[in-house]
Amino acid sequence: MAKQNEEPKAKMGKKMWIRWFISQYILPVKKNKIVFSQFGGKGYGCNPRAICDEFLRRDEGYDLVWILGKSQTREKAGIPDGVRTVTGDLSMSELATAKVWINNIHFNFLLEKGLKKRPQTIYLNTFHGGITIKNEGTDKHTYQPNKKLSKKEQMYRLDASYVDYITSGCDMENHVLEEFFFGNGEIVKLGDARTDMLINGAPEIEKKVREFYQISADTKIAIYAPTFRSDMKLNWYQLNYEEILDTLEKETKSPWVMLIRLHPRLAGQTKKIVPDSPHFIDAGNYPDMQELSAASDLMISDYSSVITDFMFTRRPAYMYVPDLDQYLKSRGLYFTMEELPFPYARTTEELITCMKEFDQRAYEGKVDQFIEKIGCINDGKSAKRIVDFLIEKMNQKK
């Protein structure tokens, strides 16, 4: 065992290593401890947040622990009372004695340091893609047995091998999840918990977002939230932002602002593409995308699954896809553009035309047809189903 733990010892200080070793190999698993993480410690959000909120609502004595990145604080991340926080290598000690791990990506950054899942621990991965539009890059079909894997690829596969259950919201998601987790874990169709907020409505969240950005109650909110491109170029996001807001204001006879939420890989780039105006707000550092969606009256996106989440609000949503032909060739989509319920445009002019010709009733009909086609069960009660499921499994797995 000493040789087995040389690498972890080398990657953390001696005191921290001793604490982790005792937690990993000596202390028992705590039957009521649940440890959450999302996007490698980036705030309080996505499916894990919705599940944690449901445990908090029930108030049944669970020890809820949230992993934060070193640059995060409770206040900045929006961690509620009743949830402990942990950062850095201390996360390994908490995970080592947890009954349940809940994540929406992976624990690669801790597995590299030696973290191991114990037999009594349940690992539930909620994924972060939801109803995925774009092809996911890492999957079991790209695996080549004779290829030497990078450290990152090794950790992806190790993490996937630990997964016990993967939550799904619709039949369409299942093949994506099977590929992404290399065939590991049991897929359980319980719903995408993060959509509960969008389906049920959250006036208190809308008020919170408006107060955070000092947006008046009579001003409508549009959000532009595209995904990244592999070339990391910014020209794909060069909309005529002023003309779009001007169109919306003329069509609705109301003032508008636009939140800009670029993908985290493009953090800090918003000012390079958006006019310097109080009507355009960089929302890149806001802790939870779902809260921004819940507060928005309209969304513009592209191939990101944020738009398939947003459709549950039944509010207008548009796909701006100037690189559609290239994207289809280089990455590909799980749906044709015609199968999706959203109006789409390749230019600002086309997007404005879509907005002027938008038919709310027809759009809602397309959304309903799409949801039925993909076998979706998201109904505002997903977090409740997931927590019920977890409690049952926690009681079974001693």
Image (tube, grey):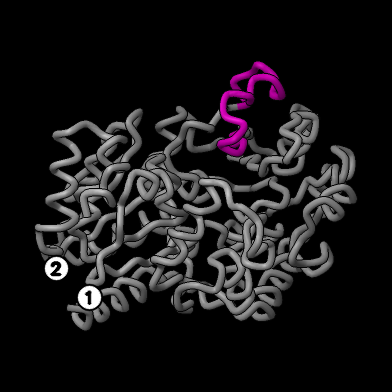
Residue in view at x 44 percent, y 63 percent: 126
Name the residue nearer the viewer: 174 or 74.
174
Residue in view at x 88 percent, y 44 percent: 350
Q: Judge left or right: residue 179 versus residue 87.
A: right
For the N terminus, give its image quadrant.
bottom left
For the C terminus, give its image quadrant.
bottom left
Residue in view at x 76 percent, y 43 percent: 251
Q: Is residue 320 visible?
A: yes
Q: Which mark is residue 195?
A: none
Q: Residues within 10 Å of mark 2 (few under 14, many from 20)?
A: some
Give the residue type at disc 2: Lys
Q: Residues within 10 Å of mark 1 (few under 14, many from 20)?
A: some
Q: Residue 68: x and y, percent?
A: 32, 40
Q: Where is mark 2, residue-wise?
A: 31
Helix, strand or loop at label 2? It is strand
Residue 73, above or below 179: above
Q: Residue 296: x and y, percent?
A: 56, 45
The span picked out in magenta is 259-280
Q: Quadrant of residue 180?
A: bottom right
Residue 329, above or below 199: above
Cβ atoms at labels 1 and 2 below 8 Å apart: yes
Q: Where is mark 1, residue-wise?
A: 394
Name the residue nearer the viewer: 331 or 74.
331
Q: Quadrant of residue 264?
A: top right
Say whether residue 76 is magenta. Answer: no
